C-alpha cells in the first residue's frame, strides 16, 4: 500500500475534495488530477489537517511472515512482587549473562530459552503503563503475567489487571508469587481467581498457573516455559522485511547522546540511518543498540532496542514510522504537533466552565 488518490482520501475523511486540494497545495504537494496518488505520509498530513484521526494499517501482503517472540507485561496488585519478579527474570536474561550481571535499564529485556526461542519482557510493570500504551493504540503486549501474592490473595488491583487484559483481549498467565512464605496459600488464590471468572487450566480452562518465588528464585523456569507455551499456542508472527512499524516503550534524555527511545518493532525491520517520525517528534536513526548495549545495524520484530538520533523526546506508546526524507519527517512531525495542540486546546475548551461576569 503506497498511498491513495484524492478521491479516496475525500471518501475516507468525508471532506470535500476542494478543501483537501487546498491543503495539498499548502504543504507544497503538486496535484494535477484527483486521480493522482498521494503518498501515505501526505495522506496522513492532510487527514490531520481536516481533523480526522489517522491509523496506519500495514498490510503483510506479498511479504514473508515469520514467527516472532512474545512480548510480555507483568501486572498485579501493589507489593505482590511485580518488580521483584522482573528483577529475578532479568537475571536470567541475555544482558545479565553477557554483561556479567550489569544490565542497563532499557525498559525491556530478552530471555533466551534453551530451545532457541526467546521472550521479551517489558520492564514497566503495572496496568497504568499498559493502559496508557493501549489508549494510544500501541498494542505491544501479547501476554500478561498476572502476579498474585500467595499470602495475600486476590486484591482490587488484581481484578483491575484482569479487566485490562480482558478488554485488550490479551491472554493471562498467572504467577502465584511469594510461595516461599509460611503463610502462602496458593490453593486459596486458585479458588479466588476461579470464582472471579478466570478459567484456570486445572479447572478445565486455558489459563496456566505457575507457583513462583521471586526472592528464592523458584519456579522462574516454569514460568518462562508457560509463557513460551502460551506464545506457541498464539502462533505469533510478523512481517520481517520492509519498513519498520515500531512503538516506543520508554524514552529518556541523555546528556551526551540526546533523546533516547527504547523501541519494540511490531513488523518489518528498523534500520540505522533512516528518517523516522516518532509520535510528534522526528529524527534520523544514528545508532541502534540492543539490550546489552551493543551497537547493531537493525532491529527485527519483538526485539527491544534503544534508538538514538531523535530531535525531541517522544512518549511511551508513540508509534515509529519510517519516512523517505528529512523533509517528509519534518512535515509529518509538524503536522502531528499541530494536531496535538489543537486537541489540547479543544480539551481545555470542553472543560471550561462559565462564570458570570460581576461587572455586568
Ligand atoms: P510490586 O509493588 O508488585 O512491584 O512488589 P515488589 O517487587 O516491590 O515487592 C514488594 C515486597 O514483597 C518487597 O518487600 C519484596 O521483597 C517482597 N517480595 C517480592 N517477591 C517476594 C517473594 O517471592 N517472596 C517473599 N518472601 N517476598 C517477596
Ligand atoms: Mg514495583
Image (tube, grey):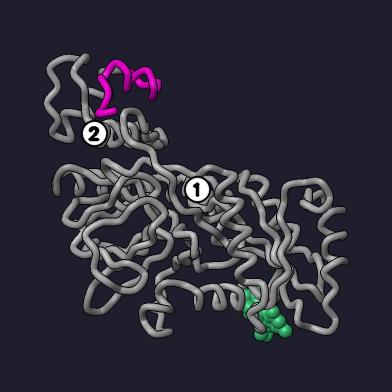
Q: Residue at x 22, y 44 (%)?
A: 323
Count neighbours of disc 1 (C-alpha within 10 A) and say few if under 14, some if 14 to 19, many if 20 or more. some
**Res 129 seen here:** yes
Residue 139 numbered tag: 1
Residue nearest the observer in this picture, 304 or 96? 96
Q: Is residue 284 left or right of residue 357?
A: left
Residue 42 numbered tag: 2
Q: Residue at x 38, y 24 (%)?
A: 13
Residue nearest the observer in this picture, 40 or 47? 40
Closer to viewer: mark 1 or mark 2: 1
> Percent position (x, y) of residue 120?
47, 61
Q: Residue at x 23, y 53 (%)?
A: 271
- Secondary structure of the residue carrying tag 1 is loop
Please identify the quarter of the rendering in which residue 20 is found: top left
Vertical order, 203 against 253 (above or below): above
- Secondary structure of the residue carrying tag 2 is helix
Alpha carbons under labels 1 and 2: distance apart: 25 Å
Q: Is residue 66 left or right of residue 192?
A: left
- Residue 81 part of the magenta-drawn span: no
Residue nearest the observer in this picture, 1 or 112? 112
> Percent position (x, y) of residue 15?
36, 21
Please identify the quarter of the rendering in which residue 160 is found: bottom right
**Res 338 seen here:** no
Please identify the quarter of the rendering in which residue 94 is found: bottom left
- Residue 5 part of the magenta-drawn span: yes
Q: Residue at x 67, y 77 (%)?
A: 218
Asked if ligand 2 lies within 8 A of label 1, the reply is no
Instruction: Please provide the residue range marked out in magenta.
Output: 1-16
Say whether marks 1 and 2 touch (CB < 8 Å). Answer: no
Question: First in sequence: mark 1 or mark 2?
Answer: 2
Amino acid at each position: 500500500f503506497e498511498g491513495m488518490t484524492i478521491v479516496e482520501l475525500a471518501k475516507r475523511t468525508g471532506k470535500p475534495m476542494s478543501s483537501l486540494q487546498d491543503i495539498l497545495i499548502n504543504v507544497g504537494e503538486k496535484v494535477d488530477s484527483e486521480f493522482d496518488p498521494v503518498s501515505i505520509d501526505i495522506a496522513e498530513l492532510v487527514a490531520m489537517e481536516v481533523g480526522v484521526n489517522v491509523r496506519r494499517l500495514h498490510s503483510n501482503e506479498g511479504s514473508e511472515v515469520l514467527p516472532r517472540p512474545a512480548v510480555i507485561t507483568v501486572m498485579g496488585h501493589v507489593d505482590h512482587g511485580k518488580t521483584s519478579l522482573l528483577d529475578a527474570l532479568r537475571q536470567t536474561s541475555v544482558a545479565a549473562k553477557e554483561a556479567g550481571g550489569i544490565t542497563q535499564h532499557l525498559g525491556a529485556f530478552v530471555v533466551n530459552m534453551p530451545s532457541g526461542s526467546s521472550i521479551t519482557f517489558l520492564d514497566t510493570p503495572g496496568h497504568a503503563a499498559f493502559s496508557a500504551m493501549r489508549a494510544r493504540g500501541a498494542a505491544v503486549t501479547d501476554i500478561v503475567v498476572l502476579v498474585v501474592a500467595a499470602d495475600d490473595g486476590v486484591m482490587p488491583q488484581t481484578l483491575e489487571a484482569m479487566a485490562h487484559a480482558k478488554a485488550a483481549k490479551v491472554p493471562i498467565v498467572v504467577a502465584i508469587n511469594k510461595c516461599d512464605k509460611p503463610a502462602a496459600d496458593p490453593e486459596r488464590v486458585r479458588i479466588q481467581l476461579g470464582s472471579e471468572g478466570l478459567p484456570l487450566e486445572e479447572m478445565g480452562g486455558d489459563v496456566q498457573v505457575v507457583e513462583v518465588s521471586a526472592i528464592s528464585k523458584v519456579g522462574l523456569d516454569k514460568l518462562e516455559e508457560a509463557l513460551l507455551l502460551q506464545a506457541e499456542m498464539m502462533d505469533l508472527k510478523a512481517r520481517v522485511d520492509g519498513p519498520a512499524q515500531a512503538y516506543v516503550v520508554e524514552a529518556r534524555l541523555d546528556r551526551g547522546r540526546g533523546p533516547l527511545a527504547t523501541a519494540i518493532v511490531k513488523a518489518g525491520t528498523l534500520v540505522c540511518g533512516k528518517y523516522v517520525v516518532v509520535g510528534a517528534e522526528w529524527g534520523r536513526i544514528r545508532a541502534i543498540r540492543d539490550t546489552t548495549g551493543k551497537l547493531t545495524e537493525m532491529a527485527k520484530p519483538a526485539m527491544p532496542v534503544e534508538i538514538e538520533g531523535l530531535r525531541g523526546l517522544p512518549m511511551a506508546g508513540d508509534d515509529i514510522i519510517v519516512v523517505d526524507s528529512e523533509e517528509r519527517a519534518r512535515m509529518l512531525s509538524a503536522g502531528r504537533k499541530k494536531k496535538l495542540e489543537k486537541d489540547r486546546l479543544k480539551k481545555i475548551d470542553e472543560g471550561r466552565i462559565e462564570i458570570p461576569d460581576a461587572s455586568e
